[in-house]
Amino acid sequence: MLCKLLHTIGSYLILMRQTFTRPQRGSVFWRQYVHEFYQLGYNSLFIVILMSFFIGALLCVQIKINIWSPWMPRFTIGYAMREVILLEFASSIICIILAGKVGSNIASEIGTMRVTQQIDALDVMGVNSANHIMLPKILAMTSAIPLLVTFSIASGFIGAYVTCWFGGFLSLSDLTYGLQHSFESWHLWSGYIKSLVFAFIIASVSCYFGYTVRGGSIEVGKAGTNSVVVSSVLILFTDLLLTNLLMA
Amino acid sequence: MITITDIHKNFEHQEILHGISATFDAGKTNLVIGRSGSGKTVLLRCIVGLLTPERGEVLFDGRDIHHLTKRETTFLRQEIGMLFQGAALFDSMDVLHNVLFPLEMFSSKTYQEQLQRARFCLDRVGLSDAESKMPSELSGGMQKRVAIARAIALEPRYLFCDEPNSGLDPISSRIIDRLISDITHEYSITTIVNTHDMGSVRGIGEQILFIHEGRAEWTGTSHNINQASNPHLREFLKHA
């Protein structure tokens, strides 16, 4: 078990070394990068906005129903919701959702390339296949994540405003006051920093599982599942470490 | 010319290739034949460097592919074209961009010249009207022809074909065979074709290597294959 774990970590690091080299042809790399940015970033925007909107709305309702009491100031709802969204939801939870959507997509795409010998074809041509396939995905994912986090935060707040407006249990001015109360910009930045690390984990781990597939369609399916499970666990573990480091 | 000497390859303590030696001449269609599981594909993968043999050397006109620097290997690989069993076209690109890809990666030509070359290669394999199609829209035979066009785009000195006729009807098989043979002679390429199709052996086999259970058991030409005395080859021919 330990031997297998060490072997996996070792082969992951070797693959990353192969990946992080200078692209052989800049123009081809940039074209791939733009394509991946669109595929992994832009195509995830809708799900991020949708989920963040509803989570923002639900957080508002839950805090109102379960936490709020007449002894608490009304703006507490907005304040608590802001902290949850900035500190955990927009970075960690969104990244776990993306590990499911983007991670399985990456692993199955690269896995299929492996079993249909497309990666062998690249290697025979003299292309550094790891660099050609994985680097644009990893860079596109890490550069798209700050935008996704920004949209997630904004959608969460909009969800809260919409709920308060239609639910009528909190005035918009109280919510706005709560959202602005004791604002620490570091909380926002730490969310962005964490999301960058998580994006790297999602892309690189999924690429690793896809690239190392051996066999056929069943193994490709397993690679997709494994990439989601391992990325999610690593995100949660890293979240714990980073939260302690950044918020201490 | 490609020379292989004493190639040994193991997979998890099981020896697949038991010291194969052979010479493949330039300008000839060299065929490697044998039953399924005899080690043909493993040998081809060792030759092109996708697998590293435990022992032995593979010389491309004197250059050992397994003992070159990274830079030399990349340079040598640009002289290699390969047709895989399943064509291995990039399914995210259309036909034209599949052929254009090696040119974009390695050629110093302008984009217009690259386009011209890619279109010439597609025309050479008779697919000039399919350039905007995706690989999934093509038949198996057409995919193999696109793969040949991609393999010759950089004007390679060495061409490798792994079971080029697998899954094709006899007519498409002969078209692919003829194309490989014509290209080999036209550009004086060293071509190695893995096959168990006797139609290919009789049609284009100029130099033949017969492998049985990881051992080179017979070499000859399509003219004298029927007179071979090797019992495994005779058995193979009897059922072919």
Image (cartoon, rainbow, N blue to C red):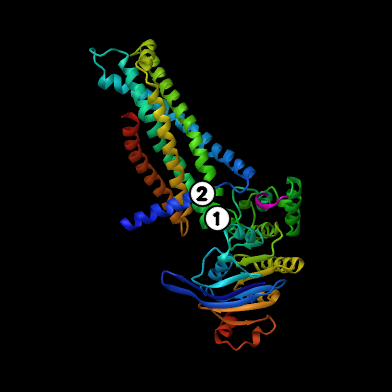
Highlighted range, magenta: B104-108
Tell me which amino acid carries mark 1.
Ile
Residue at figure coordinates x 32%, y 18% from the top left: A77
Which residue is most to the front? Answer: B69
Residue behind mark 2: A19
Residue at figure coordinates x 58%, y 85% from the top left: B234
Q: Quadrant of residue A200?
A: top left
Q: Position of residue A6 (x, y in %)?
A: 36, 55
Residue behind mark 1: A119
| Subunit ID for the residue under disc 1 | A
Q: Nearer the viewer, mark 1 or mark 2?
A: 2
Residue A226: image tag: none
Residue B105 highlighted magenta (yes or no): yes
Q: Is residue B235 visible?
A: yes
- Which of B146 and A181 lies nearest the eye of the viewer? A181
Q: Is residue A131 above or below residue B154?
A: above
- Which of B63 and A91 lies nearest the eye of the viewer? B63
Residue A37 highlighted magenta (yes or no): no
* Residue A99 appears left or right of A140: left
Q: Position of residue B64 (x, y in %)?
A: 59, 68
* Residue A160 appears left or right of A39: left
- Which of A54 and B69 lies nearest the eye of the viewer? B69
Q: Is residue B56 above or below residue A238?
A: below
Residue at figure coordinates x 44%, y 28% from the top left: A152
Mark 1 Cα-neighbour bin, 10 Å: few <14, some 14–19, many ≥20: many
